[in-house]
Amino acid sequence: MSHLGIDAGGTSTRAVVLDSGGRCLGHGRSGSGNPISAGPAVAATSMRDAVEQALASAGLPGSAVSSTSVAMAGGSRVAEDDEVAAALRGALVTAGVSAALTVEPDLLALYFSGAHEPSGYALVAGTGAAAVRVVEGEVVATSDGLGWLLGDDGSGFWIGREVVRAVSGDLDGRAPGTALTSLLLEAVPRAAPSTVAALAPGDVQPPELRHLVRELYAAPPVHLARFAPLAFAAVATVDDAVAADIIARAGHALSNTLAATLLPDLDGPVVLGGSVLVHQGALADRVRASLESAGRSMSIRVVTDGLVGAAVLALRRSGVAVDAATFATVTDSLARLR
Amino acid sequence: MSHLGIDAGGTSTRAVVLDSGGRCLGHGRSGSGNPISAGPAVAATSMRDAVEQALASAGLPGSAVSSTSVAMAGGSRVAEDDEVAAALRGALVTAGVSAALTVEPDLLALYFSGAHEPSGYALVAGTGAAAVRVVEGEVVATSDGLGWLLGDDGSGFWIGREVVRAVSGDLDGRAPGTALTSLLLEAVPRAAPSTVAALAPGDVQPPELRHLVRELYAAPPVHLARFAPLAFAAVATVDDAVAADIIARAGHALSNTLAATLLPDLDGPVVLGGSVLVHQGALADRVRASLESAGRSMSIRVVTDGLVGAAVLALRRSGVAVDAATFATVTDSLARLR
């Protein structure tokens, strides 16, 4: 009996085939698997590609798979859309897999990528930010994850937005000078000189500011997340006070988002994930420090994606008890495949 | 010799015909005149309607007009677009007006709606927020006005965004309780029960929060400005601390935006405008208090739109010196027409 775990993210889709003992036998990887941002057709193609790669590298036919778990943002609610459900099912059938499909919340897979324990917490900060409490293998509480307009406090978008607003204030004299300004102007490519509008009579805004306004409104708002690394760079290189304040506030916001999920008598583990928490140790350190200063002694683990958790969920949904030893088998054997 | 002043705003377009002594002879009003948000064709139609009404009520043909000033967001830069320039010119020609057209920044018209003095300041807070310094009849410095994503600190959008974020935090336990929550849930209409998705297994978010997320992301971000009045209502009715903090921060932001334009040796006047500053006296009071605490003694005047200023600019561009007496003639005679 084999199992299939799929981590369908906005950037990439990963699939793993494993046996009931937790040994990963094959692995595949393809493009965006998020049906909401990429569309059901693209997501289905990515899923099929990743699954076919995983089966081929395992040397198994799709018919060997007895259970499939796919983790994606929104969880089972996403598959309530008939078009999405049909696309995902079609992708698996094309790959020869007819086993039942369970759609899981991405944060549950993130949690089980770092923990074999059935109960604990996960905090993610990538473009967005959210936390969950997991009890007996299910998400029972969420905090934030409300998107760039209503929430995502402390996320990559949030930090990037604070960066561009700090720079805008610097350029028009409303806010203190900051090293972020030169970093942002370097990061936002200038159009060819011929396409830059000449200074009109009455134009009193600095040309750098008009350049930023023109370029940054031309892209979707969430693209501001790409400027989050500038805040960390400005602190690391010149100890910029404005950037340090942004990071401190982001750390506070993420700690607050996690705190809203904490129960007094459930001491973790806490699994951290998402590009910002994975790549910016300074921010993960702030979350750690806030838990310590709240007197919580918790095991904190950072994971790079939700693939181990998707595999663990495929096992759990088939009735396999995933203890510490099985969890170690999954992580070790998957690490050798990747 | 007659002059034509036009205030082309996002919500409405107003036109006034006046003589060289400042006596307003006719007035007209129509829909959106903003070529960027409404498109050049709609803006041109609004302008033509308002101008034809103003000429008709003055009993004058378009050929009697010797100068025309139109105030709009973006000022002369907007009319650099050939399509916009052609549309505006076509609208005037259709109304029988062949006099030269000058496009002025909306904040300059706002300033001259409250001041005959050639130099001073204007601060506007409507959906957006910006300040200008005017010297000898021209805008020589601006502050903010960078739009909802990069700036507009303290604006209606900014306040509305803080309201929905405070409510989101209240509903998922990340932030203190606030009276804004019930006010916002009342203000955001519920879809018919049959169209509300049923609670999915694994849905752990409060249904009110899912409702807000669904409804608020369905509209353009700037629509959040419509929730700004809730902050003032929550303070006025139940002295809500969360709402009071939002208003305090908005007042600080607007004062800061104005402060960036202030010269030590230019003591106003300061003209305040825009729906938020006009309708929410609490906010205008904060700006007043910040100037006093900075030791600046300035004449502060609140105006409801830029029409007087557009008329003043039409006179000024024709070489008419607009002194206190002429300014009083414009305001008094226009008030009788409206």
Image (cartoon, coloured by chain):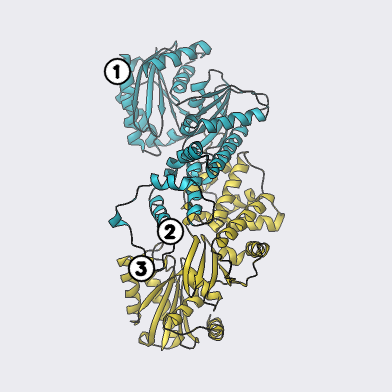
Chain colours: A yellow, B cyan
Earlier-in-chain disc, 1 versus 2: 1
Separation (CA) of disc 1 from disc 2: 57 Å
Residue A252 placement (x, y as % from top left): 61, 56
Q: Amino acid at mark 2?
A: Pro
Q: Residues within 10 Å of mark 1 (few under 14, many from 20)?
A: some
Foreground: disc 3 or disc 2: 2
Quarter of the rendering containing residue A289 = bottom right
Secondary structure category for the residue under label 1: helix
Per the image, label 3 sits on a secondary structure element best described as helix
Q: Which residue in the structure is indicated by mark 1?
A: B56
Left or right of A135 in this view: A68: left
Q: Are marks 1 and 2 on the same chain?
A: yes
Q: Nearer the viewer, residue B43 or A335?
A: A335
Which chain is home to disc 3?
A
Task: Check disc 3 and report the residue beneath it.
Answer: A79
The answer to whether residue B141 of the structure is visible from this angle is no
Labels 3 and 2 within one chain: no
Circle 3 Cα neighbour tier, 10 Å, few/some/many (<14 / 14–19 / ≥20): many
Q: Relative to A314, is B294 above or below?
A: above
In this rendering, is residue A60 above or below A268?
below
Question: Which residue carries the number 2 mark?
Answer: B206
